[in-house]
Image: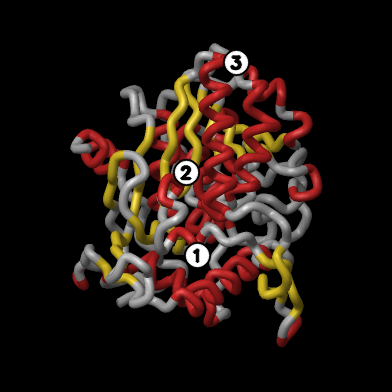
Amino acid sequence: GFIGSTMAALATSLSAIARVSSNAGLKRQQRDQPRVRAHRSRVVSASVDGPIVIAGATTPTGRLVAGLAVKAYGGSNVTLVVNQDAQDGYWPEDMPDDVVEKRMYAPAPELVKAKLVDPRDAGDALKAAKQVVFCAEWGATQAELAEQLLPFVGSDAKRVVMLSRVGINRREKAPFVEQNKPPKKLQEVALGLKLPVGENSGQPGTLDGFANAEKILADAAAKSGFSAHVVRSGELRGNGPLLLADLSARMVDNLYDVKYQDLYFKKGDEGQGYTKRLNLAATLLRLTTTDSTPPADCAALSVVCEMIDPFGLMGEKTLTEPTGVERRKGYDMAKGKAPAPIANELIDELIAAL
């Protein structure tokens, strides 16, 4: 069996709150005066066909994609779509540079070179973009971004990659019925924490939202002529780039980052399970920038599961094994010692085998 849905939902909710609060103590970012310090590591400049635009860049997955993109292509080649009110403090200013690089996966002086644009002002960046990736973790948000931004993506764009979810075409079956329930309103509980335990918010379920986002993407691709690709995750697990080690609710995410380092790809909307954010981010970036043509629709899972019974009454069982103990040794999430993201070469190999 696996983690009970209630406990998993609670841990995920607390984990999401931890991620939001992880920015609270950071000083305002002075982007016009980036710090310049000596760095032991250098950015590896890979070839990229024009600027990369990352939408949904404030989600944990989007932040990871942003850091990995800056590391691979240099900050000046990366544009992040971030609401105006979230731009100050987007990068950690009050952290030692070595910690920034460990947690954001790129050197601080390069990170601050990335351009941050509000969605309402992103038209020029999108018209100039050769690659665009949508990283919103909630379906309704992904659909809103797609509707707002895709009309500006021109025929010169090489590729648009969108994060979606497995279960889009199986929304009436377990466990996706539960996953697609409309979100509840945030309600304050003990210790001042706000959890989604109130009345229904009136928003669509996340799978409904992602299905809508996919349709908007397909329509825009047909109209503008760019190449459209969908990468489906399972339920998201694992830390974003800013790790809080002092909240026990993070244990679920810490477990995934060390215990499940592998990735399993499937064609289209197949399979069910959980996906580690770091390897998902590496996959999204790789499929956005690779020279070869990626699949139009694939799923990436860190843990593959199946329902014990068709109605979901007895829960689910895992079909894949955790990472071997030897490969887990030496990592300590509380000290920021995390496994590296999955290598591009391995992503290429796994995708080629589909």
Coordinates of residue 159 in the picture (x, y in percent)? 47, 24
Residue at horizontal 54%, vertical 32%? Answer: 215
The amino acid on which the numbered mark 3 sits, given as a three-letter code, is Gly
Residue at horizontal 33%, vertical 58%? Answer: 302
- Alpha-carbon neighbours of circle 2 within 10 Å: few (<14), some, or many (≥20)? many
Q: How is the image coloured?
A: secondary structure
Q: Which residue is mark 1?
A: 178
Q: Which residue is mark 2?
A: 68
Query: SS class of the residue under badge 1?
Result: helix
Which quadrant would residue 121 be assigned to in this image? Answer: top right
Question: Outermost residue toward the bottom?
Answer: 190
Of pointers 2 and 1, the one earlier in the residue sequence: 2
The amino acid on which the numbered mark 2 sits, given as a three-letter code, is Leu
In this rendering, position of residue 97 left or right of residue 33: left
Query: SS class of the residue under badge 3?
Result: loop
Which quadrant would residue 310 be assigned to in this image? Answer: bottom left
Residue at horizontal 30%, vertical 63%? Answer: 305
Q: Which residue is mark 3?
A: 154
The mark found on residue 259 in the picture is none
Residue at horizontal 71%, vertical 21%? Answer: 124
- Alpha-carbon neighbours of circle 1 within 10 Å: few (<14), some, or many (≥20)? some
Are the two marked residues, 3 and 1, in contact with CB atoms closer than 8 angstroms? no
